[in-house]
Image (cartoon, rainbow, N blue to C red):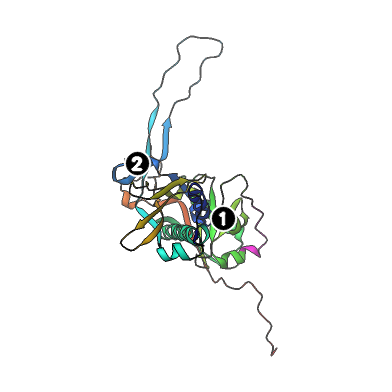
């Protein structure tokens, strides 16, 4: 027997499902499809972050009509943040004539599955790096043992101070030591992702909710590292590359969660090798839409200096003194 191949029309849905299943961080932030990037200057589009429209409300006379109503202009503007597509992630492997002729290989399980997982893992790693590189405006430290509910209330108070992050779509993302403290505190209540787009990875990592906000544990965070953020703090753009005319076989696809990728297979006659390539275009952008604030009429305007803006849709929390939650063992000599 030789290679057991999968049906071509089922290949892309198969590995897109694999990519999505392992996504954690990418499922917690905003995702946009890549079709709008086609023809975009510099592979960049603008995401609207504030739609300010100001109208005037007036009172009209009751039962009498002594004068006409007043027509007022509606003033305002829209502002936005650039979202860039700038990364080509791929996994490529070769199957020699000897592999294709003599070896028993289940193509979907032994070739496509590890390729899809490799691309998915790298997408997760890029998302984690974006969290750590974000220019959060606010952060605070917490000593071990502090009531988790108080931490949640304080995080919300600080994020609300900038009057930018929507109340919905907020998440706690925490490391393993913080998760251990919160789990033994009896402050967590049950949270169910039903009705929301989630993945097995997200559901398995969700340990409950705190003050109405889902709590997700990510083991690749430092044990005492944590974030409280609204999903619009970071944006993942994703697009499947086009199938080139020179490819022997190729497919592209996008699934219901918005993940898109391409699979190619061709033959390299110079090395007598079949090649399987899974790839995707991606870009993770941080939303820095800090406002001027204050009491002036322009308080909701973006800071003019883009380099000075901070991310006001999330914040970082750092715990100190965390560790085992077990009580200290009795001294045998006592």
Nearer the observer: mark 2 or 1; the answer is 2
From the viewer's perspective, is residue 316 above or below residue 80? below
Whole-percent x, y for residue 146 in the image: 59, 64
Q: Give 253 or 155, whichever is nearer the viewer.
A: 253
Report the residue marked by disc 2. 38
> What label sits on residue 202 in the rendered view?
1
Q: Secondary structure at mark 1?
A: helix
At x 39%, y 45%, the residue is 291
Does the magenta portion include 187?
A: yes
From the viewer's perspective, is residue 228 above or below residue 271? above
In this rendering, does residue 229 appear at all?
Answer: no
Give the CA distance from mark 2 to mark 1: 31 Å
In this rendering, does residue 274 appear at all?
Answer: yes
Whole-percent x, y for residue 11 in the image: 49, 51
At x 43%, y 17%, the residue is 70
At x 44%, y 44%, the residue is 32
Q: Main secondary structure of the magenta part?
A: loop
Quadrant of the rendered image containing residue 268: bottom left
Does the magenta portion include 32?
A: no
Q: Give 332 or 5, whichever is nearer the viewer.
A: 5
Q: Quadrant of the C terminus?
A: bottom right
From the viewer's perspective, is residue 29 above or below residue 39? below
Whole-percent x, y for residue 204 in the image: 60, 58
Give the residues drawn in magenta, as a range.
182-192
């Amino acid at each position: 027997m030789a290679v057991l191949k999968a049906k071509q029309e089922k290949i892309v849905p198969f590995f897109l499902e694999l990519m999505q299943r392992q996504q954690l961080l990418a499922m917690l932030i905003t995702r946009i499809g890549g079709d709008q990037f086609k023809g975009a200057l510099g592979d960049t589009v603008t995401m609207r972050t504030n739609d300010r429209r100001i109208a005037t409300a007036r009172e009209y006379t009751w039962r009498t009509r002594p004068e006409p109503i007043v027509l007022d202009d509606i003033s305002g503007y829209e502002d936005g943040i650039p979202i860039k597509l700038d990364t080509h992630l791929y996994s490529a492997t070769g199957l020699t004539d000897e592999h294709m002729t003599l070896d028993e290989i289940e193509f979907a399980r032994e070739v496509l599955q590890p390729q899809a997982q490799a691309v998915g893992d790298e997408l997760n790693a890029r998302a984690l790096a974006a969290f750590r590189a974000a220019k959060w405006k606010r952060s605070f430290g917490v000593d071990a043992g502090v009531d988790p509910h108080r931490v949640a209330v304080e995080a919300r108070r600080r994020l609300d101070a900038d009057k930018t992050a929507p109340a919905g779509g907020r998440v706690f993302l925490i490391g393993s030591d913080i998760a251990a403290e919160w789990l033994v505190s009896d402050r967590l209540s049950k949270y169910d992702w039903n009705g929301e787009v989630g993945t097995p990875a997200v559901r398995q990592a969700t340990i409950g909710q705190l003050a109405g906000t889902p709590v997700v544990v990510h083991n690749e965070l430092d044990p005492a590292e944590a974030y409280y953020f609204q999903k619009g703090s970071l944006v993942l753009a994703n697009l499947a590359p086009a199938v080139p005319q020179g490819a022997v076989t190729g497919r592209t696809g996008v699934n219901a969660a918005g993940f898109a990728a391409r699979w190619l297979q061709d033959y390299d006659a110079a090395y007598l090798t079949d090649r399987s390539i899974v790839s995707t275009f991606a870009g993770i952008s941080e939303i820095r839409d800090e406002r001027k604030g204050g009491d002036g009429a322009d308080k909701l305007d973006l800071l003019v200096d883009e380099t000075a803006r901070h991310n006001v849709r999330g914040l970082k929390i750092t715990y100190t003194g965390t560790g085992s939650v077990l009580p200290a063992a009795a001294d045998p000599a006592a």
